[in-house]
Image (cartoon, helix red, strand yellow):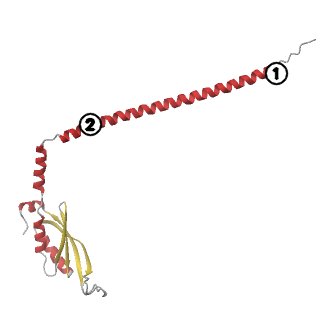
């Protein structure tokens, strides 16, 4: 009797086992490559963040030195600052006196605002001719470098007696003029303004 030898199924089993092992090895290799790439990317990011942290630490140290130097400044610097502020102050009472003194007739000085070397006057007039005359008077004063009419608008005074009545801008209107002036600081500090 001849023995029953079946070689074919054994070869198929080894091929299946080899293919399975190959797939497992490729998966393991892919996982290793994936984690290796991530390790290098994360490592690079960590080094970059450490470098940024070092730069920020250096900046903090420099700023703390600057703060310490500012806190330790001698009082002479503060005194110089106060003296400078005292020499730069401007007495606006002269400006207000000139603005009020030049109002004539129906003109009514309503207010002033000041910023840097510019002042704005608000003046009420019965006629625009009065506003023009007022601006000419201010232009002739040595305290002002420039005098310009910023805006002029008509309005009607409303009182308790005429609140119900229809307002007539032609007959009883007044004018609000906003006049901008540039101040001459040297003249103000030296006592100018007549």
Image position of 4 with respect to 185: above or below:
above
Which disc number belongs to residue 62?
2
Instruction: Report x, y in % for residue 119.
Output: 18, 66
Q: Could you tell me which residue is drawn at 13 percent across and 41 percent down?
A: 74
Residue beneath disc 1: 9
Nearer to us in this view, 27 or 152: 27
192 sits left or right of 132 in the view: left
Identify the element where label 2 is drawn: helix
Q: Is residue 39 left or right of residue 103?
A: right
On the image, the x and y values in percent for residue 125 come to: 19, 79
* In the rendered image, the vertical position of residue 148 relative to residue 50, given as above or below: below
Q: Residues within 10 Å of mark 1 (few under 14, many from 20)?
A: few
Q: Earlier in the sequence, mark 1 or mark 2?
A: 1
Which label is found at residue 101? Answer: none
Outermost front residue: 160
In the picture, the quarter occupied by the N terminus is top right
């Amino acid at each position: 009797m001849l023995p029953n030898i079946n070689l074919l199924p054994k070869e198929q089993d080894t091929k299946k086992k080899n293919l399975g092992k190959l797939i497992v090895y490729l998966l393991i290799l892919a996982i290793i490559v994936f984690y290796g790439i991530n390790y290098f990317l994360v490592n690079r990011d960590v080094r970059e963040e450490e470098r940024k942290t070092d730069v920020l630490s250096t900046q903090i140290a420099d700023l703390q030195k600057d703060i310490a130097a500012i806190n330790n400044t001698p009082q002479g610097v503060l005194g110089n600052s106060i003296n400078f502020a005292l020499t730069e102050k401007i007495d606006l009472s002269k400006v207000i006196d000139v603005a009020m003194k030049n109002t004539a007739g129906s003109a009514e000085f309503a207010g002033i605002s000041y910023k840097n070397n510019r002042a704005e006057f608000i003046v009420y007039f019965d006629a625009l001719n009065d506003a023009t005359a007022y601006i000419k008077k201010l232009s002739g004063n040595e305290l002002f470098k420039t005098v310009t009419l910023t805006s002029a608008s008509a309005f009607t005074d409303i009182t308790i007696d005429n609140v119900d009545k229809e307002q007539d801008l032609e007959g009883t209107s007044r004018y609000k003029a906003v006049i901008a002036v540039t101040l001459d600081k040297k003249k103000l500090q030296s006592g100018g303004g007549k």
